[in-house]
Amino acid sequence: QVQLVESGGGLVQIGGSLRLSCAASGRTFSQYAMGWFRQAPGKERSFVASIGWNSGTTSYADSVKGRFTISRDNAKNTVYLQMNTLKPEDTAVYYCAAHKLPFRAAARGASDFGSWGQGTQVTVSS
């Protein structure tokens, strides 16, 4: 099992930027695809972005494509989500997740991920 701890959330103005971080521990981070999901109040958790185990593949939700960038630093056991040009509809709790199986490409389904962080709140306001 892997433990995931997100950080970097907060309150930001429309058009601003934030970088979320997710630190992993407990298993070989570099072997697992990672993902970010979010859940807004009253809505189901939805896919945001993911990155394959070797950074060879990435995938983004249409709503964030061109604004968000996912990356990973295997030396630091950390995955990042750079969020630019933030909009009010980006307001949500953001969760980091680790794929259930090693050596997988970027995935989009929540059922592909077996470990989750506790979440970090992102609020975009005018």
Image (spheres, rainbow, N blue to C red):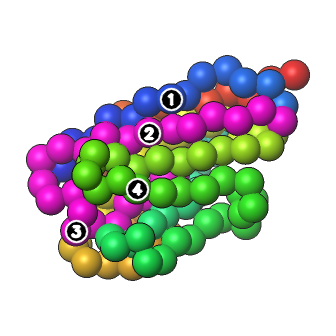
User: Around disc 4, counting alpha carbons within 10 Å, would you say few (fewer than 14), some (14 to 19), or many (20 or more)?
Assistant: many
**Which residue is disc 3 drawn over?**
31
Name the mark on residue 87. Answer: none
Q: Amino acid at mark 2?
A: Ser
Q: CA distance from mark 1 to mark 3?
A: 24 Å
Viewer-proximal residue among 4 and 66: 66
**Which residue is disc 2 drawn over?**
21
* Quadrant in which the C terminus is drawn: top right
**Which residue is disc 4 drawn over?**
72
In the visual, does 97 lie left or right of 38? left
Furthest-front residue in view?
A: 75
Q: CA distance from mark 3 to mark 4?
A: 12 Å
**Which residue is disc 1 drawn over?**
8
The kind of secondary structure element at disc 4 is: strand
Viewer-proximal residue among 120 and 65: 65
* Residue 22 sits inside the magenta stretch: yes
* Residue 26 sits inside the magenta stretch: yes
Quarter occupied by residue 41: top right
